[in-house]
Image (spheres, grey):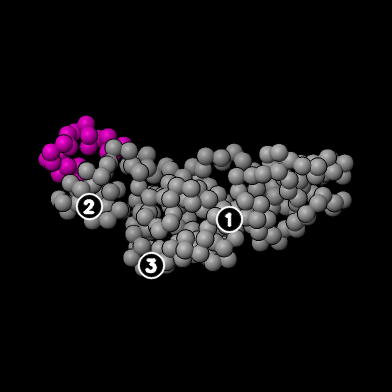
Amino acid sequence: MDIQGIGESMIDILVDQKILQNVADIFTLGDPQIQMTLQRLPGFGNKKVTEIAYQLLQAKEKPLRRLLNGLGIGHVGKKTAIILNDSLINYYSLQDETLSPLENLIKHITDETFLQAIFGIGEKTLQEIQDFFSNKHNKELLERLESFGINFDPIKYYKDKENLGIFEELNQGSFCITGTFPLSREAIVQAMQSNGRTFHEQPKKDTQILLIGDKPGSKKNKAEELGCKILQ
């Protein structure tokens, strides 16, 4: 889970003492009774126990990519976790408000069409992701993490949150794209089209928005001539 101050040697001690049995148990270390137990163990003074409690609170305010990287899903390391988090952001406007963030996450991340559209997600990784989030035991583990207040929202605590307004505006009418982006072109287009928006390969008179990334091409000049709204 990449929680500062809780390393492998500490985890080994806590497992041996039967204080930890799975990943979610880490978040019980903030419980006052368990903290008293910890203080009786070698190397766990009051200062250390207090620091652990603080770091556990901090861990609840991390972007989803950090959790995805720490769950032990096969073939999902830091890079793939970032790609998944970024791709899920494209779908945040499709979130079902009757579902919890975890339920919405599972709904999309087990969708084969969604995963196949993500550049960098191969068949083996796709299968590992689907298997993990479809597993009953893993679902129970995730539900327990959610009960401790762990973040499952792809937008919350996202490092580029200030750029999300662009995606909100893209959810209106027709659009065109030029330049490069942190997300793949295919992921952006698919997400907007799934919302019923129209993608134009080239700017037209009825193109409402041109989204500009790094190193834009000649489409920018054309869009300006046509009076398209430009977002960059």
Q: Nearer the viewer, residue 141 or 35?
A: 141
> Reading the chain from its start, which is encountered first: label 2 or label 1?
2
Q: Nearer the viewer, residue 226 or 40?
A: 226
Q: Residue at x 78, y 54 (%)?
A: 201
Q: Do the numbered discs 1 and 3 sit on residues whose CB atoms are within 8 Å?
A: no
C-alpha span from label 3 to label 2: 21 Å
- 10 Å crowding of disc 3: few (<14), some (14-19), many (20+): few
Q: Residue at x 51, y 53 (%)?
A: 84
Q: Do the numbered discs 2 and 1 sit on residues whose CB atoms are within 8 Å?
A: no
Q: Nearer the viewer, residue 144 or 207?
A: 207
| Left/right of residue 48 with respect to residue 123 in the rendered view | left
Q: Under tag 3, what secondary structure?
A: loop
> Reading the chain from its start, which is encountered first: label 3 or label 2?
2
**Which of the two marks, 2 or 1, is nearer to us in this view?**
1
Residue of label 1: 119
Residue 4 visible, this orientation: yes
Q: Residue at x 34, y 59 (%)?
A: 141
Magenta: predominant secondary structure element? Answer: helix
Number of numbered discs present?
3
Residue 135: image tag: 3
**Which of the two marks, 1 or 3, is nearer to us in this view?**
1
Residue of label 2: 20
The residue stretch that appears in magenta:
32-54
Amino acid beneath label 3: Asn
Q: Under tag 1, what secondary structure?
A: loop
185 versus 196 height, above or below: above
| Left/right of residue 149 with respect to residue 203 in the rendered view | left
Q: Quadrant of residue 200?
A: bottom right
> Reading the chain from its start, which is encountered first: label 1 or label 3?
1
Residue 13: image tag: none
